[in-house]
Image (spheres, grey):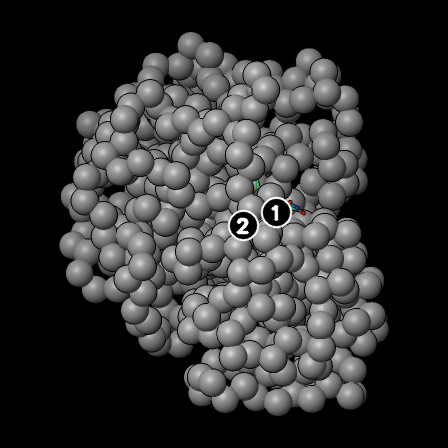
Amino acid sequence: MDWSSQPEPFRRYHGAECVALDRELAAEDLPFDSLYGAPGVAPAALGLRALADFLRHSLAISAWKELRGSRWALRVNPSSGNLHPTECYVLGGPELFGEARVTHYNAEQHILEIRARIPARLWDGLAIPPGAFLLVISSVYWREAWKYGERAFRYCQHDAGHALAALRFSAALLGWRLRWLGEWADEVAASLAGLDQEGFAEREAPEFAAVVSAGPVIGLAPPDEEVLMQWRQMKWLGAPNRLSERYVAWPFIDEVDAATRREAPVLPTALPVPRHLHRETIGARAAVLQRRSAVAFDGRTSLTALAFQQALERTLPCAAPPWDALAVPALLHLAVFVHRVDGLERGLYMLVRAPHAIERLQRAMRAEFEWRRCTTRDDLPLYLLWRGDFRRSAAAISCEQDIAGDSAFSLGMIAEYEGPLRAVGPDLYRRLFWEAGMIGQVLYLEAEAAGVRATGIGCYFDDSMHELLGLHGRELQSLYHFTVGGPVEGRRLRTMMPYGVAAARDAK
Ligand SMILES: Cc1cc2nc3c(=O)[nH]c(=O)nc-3n(C[C@H](O)[C@H](O)[C@H](O)COP(=O)(O)O)c2cc1C
């Protein structure tokens, strides 16, 4: 890791005309359950004011931190190492921008940079329904590779999953819908956002396109070749900034990138009907804006059984935000280390996120596991596998990070791996990490609602986790770890609000 070549965390397009976005936060908050699509949020009219709000509650800077003269930004969406490889493009028509445009969201200044003015007939060729616009999400692999080398690819995918959930939650607060366009090839997303244009010193790779809509989201046919060809030939405005002086190539990342590109369209799956849970401890916008990772946990705070179960229940896929954004069958299950939850024995538990998976999990894991269904909540598919104190093991598995043992609970996300990858194709590899990131985003917000804090754990020893569970081969694979508990706050840190405005409701 070479500090002098640390990449810029912000993409800018030099010379591009900018669109200012409103910086004031809405004075009113919404009930926490609005994040999950609870009724009562009327769809906001499409326009710049609502778009500003949408981006402010998903990908914007949430605070500046300062310690001994260094200053860094934190964002609404978390990121491995706070390196933020994720970029966002907003493509809208006259209803949104007065004319059709490709814009880049510049989170540093909370503005949009105009990358292209789209001729009306070309925009019409996309057949975007009234009240809707498009997003393209991309990753600058180099931002993570600079620090983490080959692991960067995985972390970028985790971050993309966190961003997808953050965007879906933010859309829900405006009464909007948001859906991944799995029918669209990745190269379509790249072309629409101008990622295949000249001038990028460091590659920006497409992750996904999504449609956001104030009305019901309907299927969108991908643009035809003629439209795409003309799109690529548009006049592209602004020059992408160079992110570091020196760049190290990681051919392995390019190989995985190429090998995991989607070849066939993925259509949305029908998801179970959601159950609305009531949580009134905190407002929805407050939770989103104050979300932070804990850097340490106090080793004391315990969670109520209700808060623990609600947090787990929110990770179950259903036809509500954020799960309706990806709408694919759940393939990740949670191996939970319960350290401090009132009324629950310490031990290793398993949350089976898709009913079909239980037999597969039971077959693959240690024969001596109990698989005792926890009766505290009938509709929660949570099983006790092994009683005991796992604080030490959890920390050891998480690259000796105490955050996994000093919390109330921590967990490993166990993916059904080789079978689905063979059946669906290598592109599923990316989506498994997106699913992991989405689960993580739910847990971050649930932690805020429960008055505690969470932290993603990308650094863990999968072999040790597999050994603990008795896994052999590649049928199941641990893909991401997470921890939730009472945080220890760093006192010497100074926190400043972003964008130089006094917020109507201060974020912590
Ligand atoms: C995919 C991912 C992996 C992470 N891995 C770790 C980790 O192993 N250890 C840790 O202390 N924090 C980890 N974090 C937390 C990040 O360091 C944190 O999100 C980042 O510093 C930004 O801070 P914030 O979450 O408070 O906005 C991870 C976060 C993500 C999204």
* Residue appearing at x 58%, y 68% in the figure: 340
> Residue 428's image quarter?
bottom right
Instruction: Determine the residue positioned at 31% across, 36% down.
Output: 506
Q: Nearer the viewer, residue 144 or 503?
A: 503
User: At label 1, which amino acid type do we have?
Assistant: Ala
- The kind of secondary structure element at disc 1 is loop
- Quarter of the picture containing the C terminus is top left
Image marks 1 and 2: residues in contact by CB distance under 8 Å:
yes
Does residue 113 lie above or below 351 as drawn?
A: above
Regarding residue 109, the answer to whether it shows in the image is yes
Above or below, 420 against 48 in this view is: below
Q: How many marks?
A: 2
Observer-nearest of 44 and 376: 376
Residue 144 in the image, given as x and y percentages of width and height: 66, 35
Element type where label 2 sits in the image: loop
Q: Is residue 51 visible?
A: no
Which residue is depicted at the point 66% across and 76% down? 347
Spatial separation of the CA atoms under disc 1 and disc 2: 6 Å
Q: Specify the quadrant that holds the N terminus.
A: top right
Residue pointed to by mark 2: 487
Residue 38 in percent (x, y) is at 26, 64
Q: Which label sits on residue 296?
A: 1
**Which quadrant would residue 101 be assigned to in this image?**
top left
Give the image location of residue 456, x and y in percent.
59, 51
Residue 266 bears which disc, if any?
none
User: Dot 2, how many residues are within 10 Å of its Cα: few (below 14), some (14-19), or many (20+)?
Assistant: many
The residue sitting at 56% across, 46% down in the picture is 488
Q: Is disc 1's CB within 8 Å of ligand 1? A: no
* Amino acid on which the number 2 mark rests in the picture: Pro
Where is residue 328 shown, x and y percent of the image?
49, 66
Q: How would you rate the neighbour count of disc 1 (Cα within 10 Å): few for under 14, some for 14-19, many for 20 or more? A: many
